[in-house]
């Protein structure tokens, strides 16, 4: 099956620094990637949708200047948490759809990145 | 607007019991897709099943079965003869054709504990 690799698996950073999370599709071209955020014991909240070569579409309430998303190629999307604060500590998960763009296609998820801001 | 409701926050059963996880959805679209995903303690999300709005046929896969009823907007998931390895959080999810961007919205999840 399709593989999505997310890196790093976990990261600890100091308040005020920026952290970059990478999401790669290893065996398919991901025209659309999604970034989700999951707080402990809560659901996945969609943060943004990114299409290769264009600006990401952010969900209401998500600060686009704080969560920078770049989808420069068909196999890589990055999420940068800028000027991180402790409240940004969370589990971030990326997912991708292949170029067939079917609504019924299941999402292929990365293994997630656990971010802790101290 | 689309919405997915999983009213059961946590369920605890003893091994070999059957358990049903409920999912109720809201959508204005006539074409939509429903999914179930499993999230074990390790955190990764595992795709379990997909169902489109035109296919109400129930499905069985091993110990798993799904009951899709459009009349009640429900897509319930049953695990037969549960095992400890089934312990995880289970998410029901919905994708609408009309939202564009192929967004998938998740329910709050049901945490299943299966005791030996």
Image (tube, coloured by chain):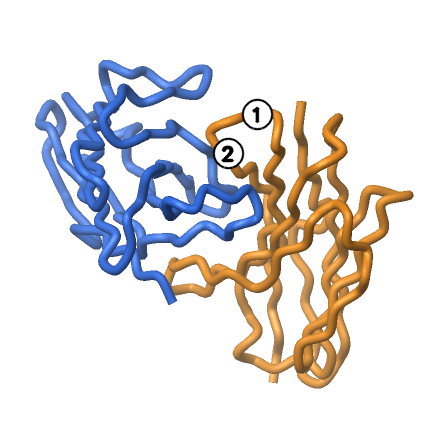
Chain colours: A blue, B orange
Find disc 1 in the rendering and name its residue. B99
State the CA–CA distance, disc 2 to disc 1.
7 Å
Find disc 2 in the rendering and name its residue. B103
The quarter holding residue A64 reads: top left
Q: Which residue is drawn at 53% across and 65% down?
A: B88
Badge 1 crowding class, 10 Å Cα cut-off, few under 14, some 14 to 19, many 20 or more, is few
Chain ID at mark 2:
B
Residue A83 picture location, percent across and down: 14, 21
The quarter holding residue B79 reads: bottom right
Quadrant holding the N terminus of chain A: bottom left
Q: Which residue is drawn at 73% across and 74% down?
A: B60
Residue B113 picture location, percent across and down: 60, 68
On residue A97, the disc is none
How many marks the image carries: the answer is 2
Residue B51 picture location, percent across and down: 68, 54
User: Circle 1 sits in a helix, a strand or a loop, which is it?
Assistant: loop
B41 relative to A55 in the view: left or right: right
Residue B42 picture location, percent across and down: 37, 64
Q: Which residue is drawn at 61% across and 64% down?
A: B112
Q: Which residue is drawn at 63% across and 54% down?
A: B110
């Amino acid at each position: 099956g399709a593989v999505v690799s997310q890196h790093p698996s976990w990261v600890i950073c100091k308040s005020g620094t920026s952290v970059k999370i990478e999401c790669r599709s290893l065996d398919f071209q991901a025209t659309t990637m999604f970034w989700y955020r999951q707080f402990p014991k809560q659901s996945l909240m969609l943060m943004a949708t990114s299409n290769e070569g264009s600006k990401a579409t952010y969900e209401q309430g998500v600060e686009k200047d704080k969560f920078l998303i770049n989808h420069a190629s068909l196999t890589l999307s990055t999420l940068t948490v800028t000027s991180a604060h402790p409240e940004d500590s969370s589990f971030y998960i990326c997912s991708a759809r292949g170029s067939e763009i079917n609504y019924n296609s299941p999402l292929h998820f990365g293994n997630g990145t656990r971010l802790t801001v101290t | 607007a689309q919405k997915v409701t999983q009213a059961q926050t946590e369920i605890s059963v003893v091994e070999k019991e059957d358990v049903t996880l409920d999912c109720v959805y809201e959508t204005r679209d006539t074409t939509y897709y429903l999914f179930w995903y499993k999230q074990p303690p390790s955190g990764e999300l595992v795709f379990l099943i997909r169902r489109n709005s035109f296919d109400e046929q129930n499905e069985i896969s091993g110990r798993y079965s799904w009951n899709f009823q459009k009349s009640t907007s429900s897509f319930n998931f049953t695990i037969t003869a549960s095992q400890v390895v089934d312990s995880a959080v289970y998410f029901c999810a919905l994708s609408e054709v009309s939202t564009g961007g192929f967004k998938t919205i998740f329910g709050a999840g049901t945490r299943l504990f299966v005791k030996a």
